[in-house]
Amino acid sequence: MCGIVGYLGDKDPKDVLLGGLKRLEYRGYDSAGVAIHDGTTFKRVRASGKLSALEEKLSNESFSGRIGIGHTRWATHGEPSERNAHPHKVGPVTLVHNGIIENFHEIKEDLKSRGAQLASDTDTELVAHLLNEEYQVTKDLRKAVERLIPLIRGAYSIVAVSEDQPNKLVAFKEGPPLVVGSSRKEVIIASDVQAILDHVQEVVYLEDDEVVEVDGTDVKFFSANGFPIRKESVKISWSADQMEKHGYKNFMLKEIFEQPRAVAAAIDPHIDLNNYRVALNRVGFGVDSVEKLDSLNFEDDLKNTIEKLSGIERIFIVACGTSFYAGMVGEYLLESFAEIPVEVDIASEFRYRDPVIPKNSLVIVVSQSGETADSLAVLRQVKELGALTLSICNVKRSSIDRESDGHLYMNAGVEIGVASTKAFVSTLSVFHLFSVFLGRVRGKLTEAQEQEYTQSLVAVPSLMESVLVYDNFFAEVAKTLKTFRGFLYMGRGVNYPIAMEGALKLKELAYMHAEGYAAGEMKHGPLALIDDRMIVMMMVPSDKHYEKSVSNLQEAKARGGVVISLGTGENTELKEMSEHYLSLPKAHWSVNPILEAIPVQLLAYHVADALGHDVDQPRNLAKSVTVE
Ligand code: G6P
């Protein structure tokens, strides 16, 4: 987590760094800081809390230099406070860091035994001490970095400057991403492209064990042991305009309303609207670099994809958070449409449980950011074990995208709200079309079935529009809902993961107790929780589970639970049983989760908003979890 920026150029570094940090604040918001050259020295200004506190502190500061580094923090070592805020400075060396230094303890003991004075509780300061020691030997920042790298272990990306070389930025990474954008007049290094795209339109992605040295506007890349390397720059596909709120109160609400467009963008490249058949577009299995995907021949790549997938006998889906719940929906769809065994797991569990991956397995890693540490670790692990891998990412050229064998994209556009919304429905859509495609490849679906299912997916964006009208309803009832003791979300079959996602959204945003349950499990525990201070939100669409779900709803109601039900069309039975009945448009069972996602998001959003919480930046969370 944490966001880092480095700048050297003709603009005022204060403005560029603050602008960049604003774009990176989704990565952490426990504290923020900058170090900017003021003509004689790098002056540090740091503040605990959100970036606005730093902005306030900097409002009367000006700097004559043209170089600086900045950081927005998600605390790992050391509480959120000004003394633990980055940048950290030791001697002439100042640096910012994203990640975790795993040999923290060892380094700390060693430094202490040599009399080092520590000014913070962070692992980052230890790196600054080590870098300073190496700098005293080499008197050159890049060479000092080369000597530092073998001394630290863990996941990190770091940008460093030195008082003695005020025209130089040096950055290096192992794990968390770093991108470098440059023009003839400026160079900017950041944790991701969002912090850069106001300034340059092309970037170079730094790989692990690579070092970049910026000297003036001369940018040179090196391997960790000092050999010069050549790197190609790529065009950024997102625009700065996508990062504006466009009149919405916050990003999350805007992103909820963008969902019909997100679904359309996710499925559009893969569906032939003349005959409603799915043809996965440039998955690129076996292509050695994602940069080459666009230039692949569509027909050849499709043949290759079919060949690769036809040998698959088992699928594993691995992800974290909301992406994991999207994976759970994927399991239902894949087993039903493609009749293939599927296992879904949380990345942080999967990677440590000695997973058995049989021959001919496909592992699908789902990640909006493409940087989640546990998901990335699973990808690397299963590749070692010989599995074929496929990623479903939103951020193109992210680590997971770049390292997987095959690539599908959410195409949701920039998602800024920390709690994922539009990337979730995009992923459900990608799973839907992938399941239909695999069903055909495996000979499990007739052409007519393929067309029917695809048509129902194509219809979803306009159906979603009609569900978004519940925004007003939830804005109204949130005032009452926020007074309840807890929320129980329930569903059966493909609707069950939406119950899980609904509970997660409420926890993330409203900080209220919520649980998602398979409705059939109610009698095995959750029924005991139900009384008149508990909201029971039940997904009860008109599908094969309908009658059983209605019985579960009766049981909840009989125990005093206050029921909100989501059903299909006009349904007097559900209306009578529920405090609030929300009617969803009639749709194929396989796309109901996409429609149900909207009310559960709106409920969490409005309850959190009514409680006065910052919905875009919930406490203690970060959007991109690049540490374990
Ligand atoms: C964090 C975010 C969630 C997200 C999860 C997985 O917890 O707050 O919204 O679902 O990470 O992220 P990923 O980028 O891998 O989908």
Image: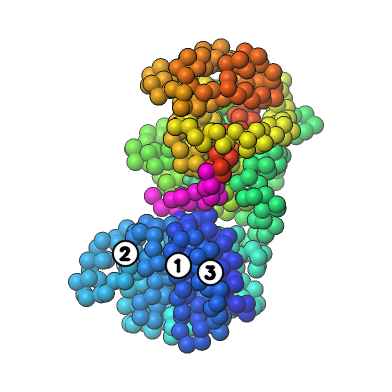
Residue at 29% x, 61% y: name it: 104
3D distance between C-alphas at marks 2 and 3: 25 Å
Q: Check residue 47 in the rendering and tell me which mark sits there, or answer none.
A: 1
Whether residue 495 can be seen here = yes
Residue at 51% x, 14% y: name it: 554
3D distance between C-alphas at marks 1 and 2: 16 Å
Q: Position of residue 506 (x, y in %)?
A: 50, 38
| Mark 1 / mark 3, whichever is N-terminal | 1
Viewer-side label of 2, 3: 3
Position of residue 451 in the picture relative to residue 193 (left or right): right
Residue 420, placed above or below residue 358 = below
- Classify 10 Å Cα crowding around label 1: few (below 14), some (14-19), many (20 and above): many
Residue lying farthest left?
Answer: 113
Q: Which residues are magenta?
A: 611-628
Residue 134 shown in magenta: no
Q: Position of residue 525 (x, y in %)?
A: 37, 21
- Classify 10 Å Cα crowding around label 3: few (below 14), some (14-19), many (20 and above): few
Which residue has dot 3 on it? 56
What amino acid does circle 2 point to? Asp
Q: Position of residue 332 (x, y in %)?
A: 54, 25
Of residues 291 and 88, the one nearer the viewer is: 88
Of residues 169 and 57, the one nearer the viewer is: 57
Residue 520, placed above or below residue 499 = above
Q: Quadrant of the N terminus?
A: bottom left
Q: Check residue 121 in the rendering and tell me which mark sits there, or answer none.
A: 2
3D distance between C-alphas at marks 1 and 3: 9 Å
| Mark 2 / mark 3, whichever is N-terminal | 3
What amino acid does circle 1 point to? Ala
State yes or no: discs 1 and 3 in contact (Cβ < 8 Å).
yes
